[in-house]
Structure formats: C-alpha cells, structure tokens
Image (cartoon, rainbow, N blue to C red):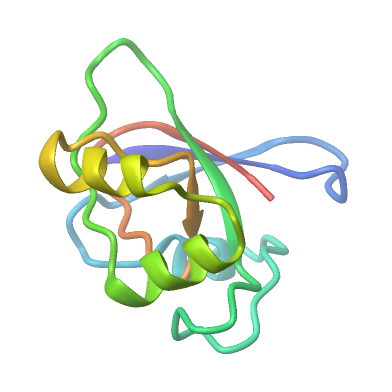
Amino acid sequence: MANVTFSSPSMPRDVTVYAVAGDNKTLLAVAQANKLGVHFECQNGECGSCLVQVKVLGTNRPMGIALTEKEKTVLRYAGKITAKQIEDAEVNDMPPPWRLACQFIVRHEDILVTF
C-alpha cells in the first residue's frame, strides 16, 4: 500500500488516499477513483495538462520510476525537466519532481502530489 496525499489550492484541505502499489494504476487513475480534481485532457501523455509535482515522503531513497518517452518530451517542452534530471532518472533511479499524472505509476512509497 502507498499513501498518496493530494494537495492543491483549489481543494479546501489535503486529501490522503491509499493506493495499491504494483497494480499498474496511474496517478491520474487513483485521483479519478477518489474524485480528486487533477486536470487532464488526453490521458495519453501528449498534452501535458495533467502536470503534477511529486515529492517522495519519508527517509528511504526514492524508488526508480521510469519516464515514458512521451513524458520526457512533454516535460522537456514545458521546461519542467532537464537533460541531467532525465539522466539521473535513467541511470541513478532518481525521479524528477515534475511528472504527468497519466504516466506516473504509483509504487510502494508514500508521496505528496501537488497540482
């Protein structure tokens, strides 16, 4: 299980939900299942409308989270990721802070999602 806390100025308070790690649900699917207002349009990683900031909570080293090619392209175009951050994600398993909710697969770690 993973605790996923959603935070947004458009919400009256932060909301923490439990997500089953490893079931291949995206962060966007978790938000939709819990009726949280993460904005989206294409749900395919091409438009960038579901851009979120993800912070791993706790003291353990963050789990390596693969970036899809679509996600890399959209994040680079939006100026939210650098070549160094992509290299760190691919070589050192250090996830970047900005992700697309439709591409991010929830892992067994507690995270704070700001949108």
The quarter holding residue 53 reads top right
**Which one is nearer the viewer's eye here, 43 or 18?**
43
Q: Is residue 110 above or below residue 38?
A: above
Q: Quadrant of the N terminus?
A: top left
Total residue callouts: 0
Q: Position of residue 29 (x, y in %)?
A: 46, 70
x, y percent for residue 90: 17, 48
**Residue drawn 57% across and 70% down?**
32
19 left or right of 43 in image: left
Q: Residue 89 falls in which quadrant of the image?
A: top left
Image height of 41 relative to 63, above or below:
below
Above-or-below relation of 112 to 32: above
Tell me what residue is drawn at x 35 percent, y 49 percent.
83
Outermost residue on the top side: it is 59
At horizontal 30% and vertical 49% (from top left) the residue drawn is: 86
Judge from the rendering whether residue 11 lies leftward or rightward of residue 43; answer left or right. right
In this rendering, is residue 10 above or below 105? Answer: above
Give the residue furthest to the front. Answer: 83
Where does the image place residue 50, in percent across and percent down from the top left?
61, 68
Query: How far across and how far down the image is residue 74, in percent?
Result: 50, 71
Q: What residue is shown at x 14% (from left), y 34% (from top)?
A: 92
Residue placed most toward the observer, 93 or 115: 93
